[in-house]
Image (cartoon, rainbow, N blue to C red):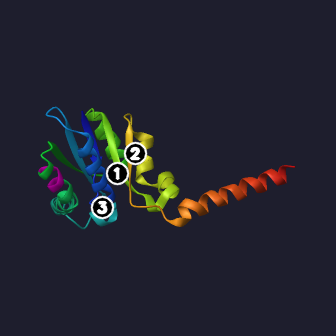
């Protein structure tokens, strides 16, 4: 089995790596760690050389992937790292297609709750991917996400029901 994990260096992406490592064992399995760096806007790119931009991206990717690489090295799990530039969701979905991965494992912070699920890069990956996407939550949702949002939705639906009568 081949898993693709977008890694940003955050605790959420490290949780995705831990999850994948716990479920994936064996010599035929492989984890692909992907770090995507944003492209510089064209007006800023004019003032820097292509080489300096590539060096900057390589350095940032190396820092973002360091903890995930160390964890997988310690666990003895086979992996490869991929550094790319562009929009995270587009690059991830494209690589998943080209490398014929079996699944994408995506780490998200639970604190952002429904907002992140609807509007984050993760939502773009889920939308564009042709393979299953496992979403691994990290941390605990806040009280507002657990109680406030459902209460507000319930009040809104009640108001609509009353207004419809």
Give the magenta range. Answer: 69-73
How crowded pointer 2 is (Cα within 10 Å; few <14, some 14-19, many 20+) is rated as many
Residue at x-position 15% and y-position 59%: 51
Name the residue carrying label 1: 88
Mark whose residue sits in front, 1 or 3: 3
- Residue 72 lies in the magenta stretch: yes
Residue 14, given in percent of the width and then of the height, sits at 27, 56
Instruction: Classify 10 Å Cα crowding around label 3: few (below 14), some (14-19), many (20 and above).
Output: some
Tally of marks = 3
Of residue 13 and residue 89, the one placed in the foreground of this image is 13
**Residue 90 higher or lower than 47, as above or below:** above
Marks 2/1: CA–CA distance = 8 Å
SS category of the residue bearing label 2: helix
The quadrant of the rendering that contains the N terminus is top left
Q: Are marks 3 and 2 in contact (CB under 8 Å)?
A: no
The structure residue drawn at horizontal position 16% and vertical position 31%, both measured from the top left corner, is 28
- The residue where tag 2 is placed is 125
> Which residue is under mark 3?
10
Asked if disc 2 and disc 1 are in contact, CB closer than 8 Å, the reply is yes
Dominant secondary structure (helix, strand or loop) of the stretch shown in magenta: helix
């Amino acid at each position: 089995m081949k898993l693709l994990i977008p890694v940003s260096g955050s605790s959420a992406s490290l949780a995705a790596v831990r999850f994948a490592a716990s479920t994936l064992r064996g010599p035929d399995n492989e984890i692909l760690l992907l770090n995507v760096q944003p492209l510089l806007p064209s007006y800023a790119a004019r003032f820097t050389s292509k080489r300096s931009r590539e060096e900057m991206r390589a350095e940032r990717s190396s820092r973002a992937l360091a903890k995930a690489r160390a964890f997988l090295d310690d666990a003895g799990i086979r992996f490869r790292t991929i550094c790319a530039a562009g929009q995270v969701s587009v690059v991830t979905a494209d690589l998943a297609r080209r490398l014929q991965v079996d699944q994408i494992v995506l780490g998200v912070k639970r604190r952002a709750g429904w907002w992140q699920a609807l509007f984050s890069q993760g939502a773009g990956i889920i939308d564009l991917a042709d393979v299953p996407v496992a979403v691994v939550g990290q941390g605990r949702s806040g009280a507002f996400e657990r109680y406030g949002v459902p209460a507000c939705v319930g009040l809104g639906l009640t108001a609509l029901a009353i207004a419809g009568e």
